Image (cartoon, coloured by chain):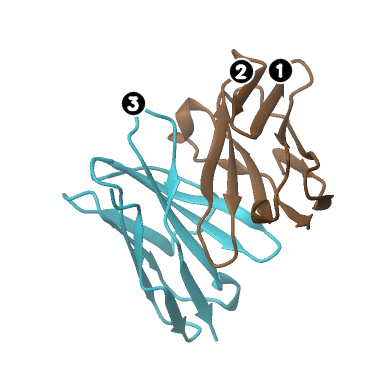
Chain colours: A cyan, B brown
Amino acid sequence: EAGVTQSPTHLIKTRGQQATLRCSPISGHTSVYWYQQALGLGLQFLLWYDEGEERNRGNFPPRFSGRQFPNYSSELNVNALELEDSALYLCASSLVGVSYEQYFGPGTRLTVT
Amino acid sequence: QQQVKQSPQSLIVQKGGISIINCAYENTAFDYFPWYQQFPGKGPALLIAIRPDVSEKKEGRFTISFNKSAKQFSLHIMDSQPGDSATYFCAASTSGGGADGLTFGKGTHLIIQP
């Protein structure tokens, strides 16, 4: 069974630009979570999508947004990039209501210059 | 506000020894406590998880001990092997992680010396 996949692996952007990151959950999982893993800050919850709806977001500004598609894949958009947005962005999926377990993908390394 | 405090930050253990990583939490609404293992360049992998209705859970060489009154939980790795060298994260959540996502500790960099 394929795990969570993310693309691209690496992304280099300039300050002020927009970045789009993509995630495909484990087959059958309907929930997708996004986390930011920045150096020195650890893993921080960004967003939760379930059944196509944004269900909750962490303590991040509105320029972090996303969506979930009918096939449950998800996209994270980061607008007006700042240098401190440089981090590993991780996507996780789960089957809410059946299991608490979140399974992570390999992440997208975003570098803002 | 750091809701999950993890210690130590780094740990060196001899092969065959017991590795112990501790976490403490503040939010009494947390009801799910997973541990993740992360290798360089990879995403975190779920190792083992516990809910507050049990005090201990064991899976192979990995054991979680949970103390609800002290609001603490720990990971024990028995017979530690060089392949266990990785960064370990404890985490906690309410409502199965959906409502507020997982709250992670800062991580423990574990090195198992041959």
**Quadrant assignment for the C terminus of chain B:** bottom right
* Quadrant housing residue B75: top right
Residue B5 x %, y %: 75, 41
SS of the residue under disc 3: loop
SS of the residue under disc 1: loop
Which residue matches tag 1? B68
Q: Are marks 3 and 2 in contact (CB under 8 Å)?
A: no
Q: Chain of mark 2?
A: B
* Quadrant housing residue A11: bottom left
The residue lying at 53 percent from left, 81 percent from top is A112
Mark 2 surroundings within 10 Å by alpha-carbon count, few (fewer than 14), some (14 through 19), many (20 or more): some
B75 and A72: which one is in front?
Answer: B75
Whether labels 3 and 1 belong to a single chain: the reply is no
**Quadrant assignment for the N terminus of chain B:** top right
In the image: residue B111, left or right of residue B36: right
Q: Is residue B29 above or below residue B2?
A: above
Q: Amino acid at mark 2?
A: Pro
Which residue matches tag 2? B52
Q: Amino acid at mark 1?
A: Lys
The residue lying at 24 percent from left, 46 percent from top is A27
Q: Chain of mark 1?
A: B
* Quadrant housing residue A79: bottom left
The residue lying at 58 percent from left, 78 percent from top is A83
Q: Amino acid at mark 3?
A: Gly
In the picture, the disc for residue A97 is 3
Residue A47 x %, y %: 43, 49
In the image: residue A17, left or right of residue B4: left
Whether labels 2 and 1 belong to a single chain: the reply is yes
Q: Are marks 2 and 1 in contact (CB under 8 Å)?
A: yes
B23 and A21: which one is in front?
Answer: B23
